[in-house]
Image (spheres, rainbow, N blue to C red):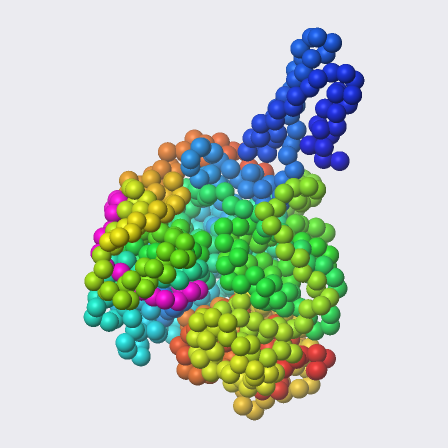
Amino acid sequence: MSEANKAQESKEEYERAGRTSHVELEYYRSGRAVGCVSGTNFGRRVCVELSFPMPKTLAQKLWDSHVVRVAPGEPDLLYVDLHLVHEVTSPQAFEGLRLSGRRVRRPDLSLATMDHNVPTQGGVRAADDLSRRQMETLAENCRREGIPLYQIGSRRQGIVHVIGPELGLTQPGMLIVCGDSHTSTHGAFGALAFGIGTSEVELVLATQCLPQKRLGDLAVTISGELPLGVTAKDIVLGLIGRTGTSLGQGHLVEYRGSTIKGLSMEGRMTICNMSIEWGAKAGMVAPDETTFKYLEGRPSAPKGEAWESALEYWRSLATDPEAPFDAEISIDASQLEPHVTWGTNPGQVAPVTGRVPQPRSDTDERALKYMDLLAGTALADIAIDRVFIGSCTNARLEDLRAAAQVIKGRHVHPKVRAMVVPGSTSVKRAAEDEGLDLVFKAAGFEWRNAGCSMCLGMNPDILAPGERCASTSNRNFEGRQGSGGRTHLMSPPMAAAAAVTGHVVDVRELL
Amino acid sequence: MEPVSRVSGRMAPLDRADVDTDQIIPKQFLKRIERTGYGPFLFFDWRAPGDFVLDRPEHAGAAVLVTGANFGCGSSREHAPWALRDFGFKAIISPSFADIFLANCYKTGLLAVTLPERQVRHLIDLASEDPSAQVTVDLEKQEVRGEGFAYRFEIDAFARECLLGGLDEIGLVERHKSAIAAYEAGRATWLPAVK
């Protein structure tokens, strides 16, 4: 029974005993309800004060534990536990600091890496002068401010959202920010994690804090057993197909339910990663044994007694029963099929067994024109030119294993150029230790170095105009993977299957 | 940041929903290390074929962009509001903005204002039919007005105050140094530091 119900019950009992009573509760944002039960007891006026914790969502717990300062009419001031930095969105922030004579407050709570425009083949030299200047600028800024940097060539370099978790730096209960919209990935650990702009990067560098307006709470409950060939990517694509691209605006999302419980950390990261694609500020999953098992022994995870203390706290990070959400969405995972996008935003998506739908809006019509697709075309008939297995959404070891399983003993279609870009240098190493590189290479895939690569095409890995790509990344926006390029988002096994057959295909036919 | 209280001028209509920041400023232009110089690359791919609405002579010099819902979705790149500002826009009106983009606009001093779909439709139609129509986005009065109409808009009170005062947000936060230090002192000892 909740505390609120208990209070109500005591009030009723009080009344049954012939006493009048009145309950007044004032709710405070500190998360406690404080109030007073008053009445008359055989003519004598009495008042009993009450104070009990309000049920909270996971997101509210994470938020409240980071509040430095609350003031009426102002956003809450939140403390940032980890600030991830990369070469593209930080140079102007460092410059701003320099111009105002400020220094980085907590270089020890900041970590920089190079990922967005690093080359993925041919050594560490950037392909163009501007990229090189951007990387050199990051190195110089980190040197001056004492911020640890995993630069290109380092054993720990990789996509910023892949290295945080694998180093054990991403932990439950933390507040993590980065000048990148896919920072929501880290929410998979029960952390509050979201992307920020460059001015906010400067603010966090200077103060380690961020003023934020309180946000709403959404729950996405996903239950049921995932069918064969259906992955975390299909869950999130299916979800965005239902919500559209902006339903999550102004909200923190908690993914819960038996399917989420059953997912690996990698799968949970894939789902949290794409929260931004339906507009949510952040996505998160309550930490559990899967989380703790993943973390234990990682370089930055707590050790010994500290581990025990951390664990005790982490176990408290779950939504309380009866904590209110503003809205809840339910998904039956057992009915899901592999999904593939047909348009130019992630909400324009359908099961692979379906057809390109009739346009319902100007946006749909524009998308079909850009994608050069006709309504009614079977998705599985769409021929592809390129395959990209990579990105912060789907380039962890589990993703590469799932793709390799489909590839093994098969060959990339002669008309297709396919590449694998591991999410980090250590994912690459681990994959090579298992021989996955040999599976991909034998099948005709290019095996590249770690980076964001063709997810956003800031390095030379881009589509030519008109080329069509089966991609495990997160955005199918116009020109995202190269001006004029056409992107179909899907899971790693689906992309692997497309590489083999030369067209979009239901991976279940190959399993 | 320069204080922003009122923007007056002509409108340019971009009648599309879900305009993402990859369109506003494509990735190949994110390699600059400066905050300026992005204007020529605004909507680069959409402008390339010619006759893009923003390049039509009747919309040259427009100060207010009126556009569809969920404007600025996708990547967190602050280069998007920088490019819009460099191009000459001082205000944007849309039924809704993506969260990060909206925060970035406020920091850039770009006046991003939401109005109901019906009123935005009126402004888009007006800008298309009469490109010389003048509009004023008044932050003080929280009103978008022109000949024969005045639409009230809501905006976060604190963001409004920062824009009107041209406040330096870092300076504002630094005033709470002792609260920050007190919070820091109470952080759990197991929390990671980067070595």
Where residue A4 appears, as percent x and y from the top left, is: 69, 32
Residue ID at (63%, 68%): A234
Where residue A53 appears, as percent x and y from the top left, is: 65, 32
Give the image quarter of residue A90: bottom left
Residue ID at (41%, 33%): B176
Q: In this view, does A272 lie to the left or right of A98?
A: right
Q: How many numbered marks does the figure carry?
A: 0
Q: Which of B189 and B13 is in front in this view?
A: B13
**Magenta residues (range):** B1-21
Q: In this view, does A251 lie to the left or right of B164?
A: right
Q: Which of A241 and A253 is in front in this view?
A: A241
Q: Is residue A436 left or right of residue A421?
A: right
Residue ID at (35%, 46%): B152
Answer whether residue A200 is magenta in the image. Answer: no
Where A10 falls versus A464 (above or below)? Answer: above
Where residue A325 appears, as percent x and y from the top left, is: 61, 46
Q: Is residue A122 visible?
A: no
Q: Nearer the viewer, residue A496 or A312?
A: A496
Q: Which of B24 and A181 is in front in this view?
A: B24
Q: In which quarter of the image is the N terminus of chain A?
A: top right
